[in-house]
Amino acid sequence: MSTVGVVENPVTRVWERFLHWLLDARKASYGLAVMRIGFGAMTVTILAMYLPNFSYSFGQGSRWGEALFRNSAVNDYVWPIPLLFSRDDPDQLLLVKILVLMGVAVVYALGWRMRIVSPLFVMLWLGFAATNPVILNTGHYQTFRIFLLFLLLADTSRRWSLDARRRARTGEEDPALGFGAWRLPRWVPILANNLAVVLIGYQLCVIYVTSALWKLQGTTWVSGVASYYPLQLEELTMFPWLNHLAWQITPAVYIASWLSVYGQLLFPLFLLNRWTRIGGLILVTGMHASIGILLALPWFSLMMILGDMIFIRDRSWESAMAWVRRAPWKARRGSRAPANADAGVSATAGAATAMPAVTPAPAPPLAELPQEIAEEREAQPSSRP
């Protein structure tokens, strides 16, 4: 009797693994929480920076720049988003709306009632961004807008949020979505969350690869001298002395130029293996940190760094938190406390032995007591056997 071996199709095996990845459990829950916290805090900071001159940028005082406003299809949103903010609003009303947006951004960062707050925050931000496309229609703001739309599909409050604390307190780990008796299947929110992770990762890879391909069209990046020129621009200088120091180190200029190009070009390939993924994340994080500090582009750099956090596995986040809990400085602090306690106990015992014992004075004989007290003492029963 002969046996016929069944060879599994590699494509089928990869497809099944991908389906299991999509439907088994929520992925990148810590990375999504970092994005939520970072985006909320970043929005509050940006709005606070615009508050002193908000009228000249978004309110009635921005009439001087109307010739530059070109409302493209990017800002054509469905009702009621176009009605939320308008340059025709009085400055007092616009200020109230901006403060409301800041409050919603704070709640968004804290992760409270995210099923309501998340779409509300996205609607308010899109309406606000449409008031001045010259300022809020640049590259990193468009990336921010795309990420916010993708995050609508994700469960961003699963970690490090007020919603997570409430679920832990009530024991409701994974509440079902629906209304009344109608509930969605359990795999639907899991699929939506993981699709959001895939879309964010795809958007990041597109940005990196496109940027690298544009750079390779010029000779300065290939030759390794491209990083020298932006370091000389005063418009992109935050710390002049630091830029002056950076461009004087010739090997650093060459290395930064080449790593910037080929690190971005090969970033999708770095994600295929754990160790190359770690190296790729360190590379792009360092690149964005350098851009934010040396080229005065903090919001773009912060946005990309926050997006890259989804590539760190939940197990890695949990291992890092466990290491922090058992950190060496905490162990030293804990060992110092019992020693102090023992010293306190020893000091107390020493003080107790050093103190002389107090011996009660003997009671005077009845003959020396007054008549009334002597009669009362005789009337009391003796406690001795």
Image (tube, rainbow, N blue to C red):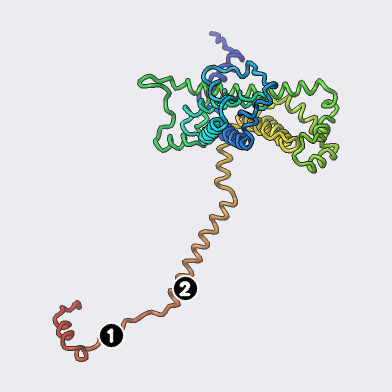
Residue 31 percent location from the top left of the image: 58, 32
Residue 362 circle label: 1
Q: Nearer the viewer, residue 333 or 37?
A: 37
Q: Amino acid at mark 1?
A: Pro
Q: Residue at x 50, y 36 (%)?
A: 161
Q: Which residue is mark 2?
A: 350
Up-down: is 78 above or below 107?
A: above
Query: Which corner quadrant of the image does residue 38 belong to?
Result: top right
Measure how far apart labels 1 and 2 are at the Cα level. 29 Å
Q: Nearer the viewer, residue 284 or 60?
A: 60
Query: Which corner quadrant of the image does residue 217 belong to?
Result: top right
Q: Residue at x 62, y 33 (%)?
A: 54
Residue 163 percent location from the top left of the image: 46, 34
Residue 120 percent location from the top left of the image: 51, 26
- In this image, 311 relative to 248: left or right? left
Furthest toward the bottom, the residue is 367
Up-down: is 265 above or below 34?
A: above
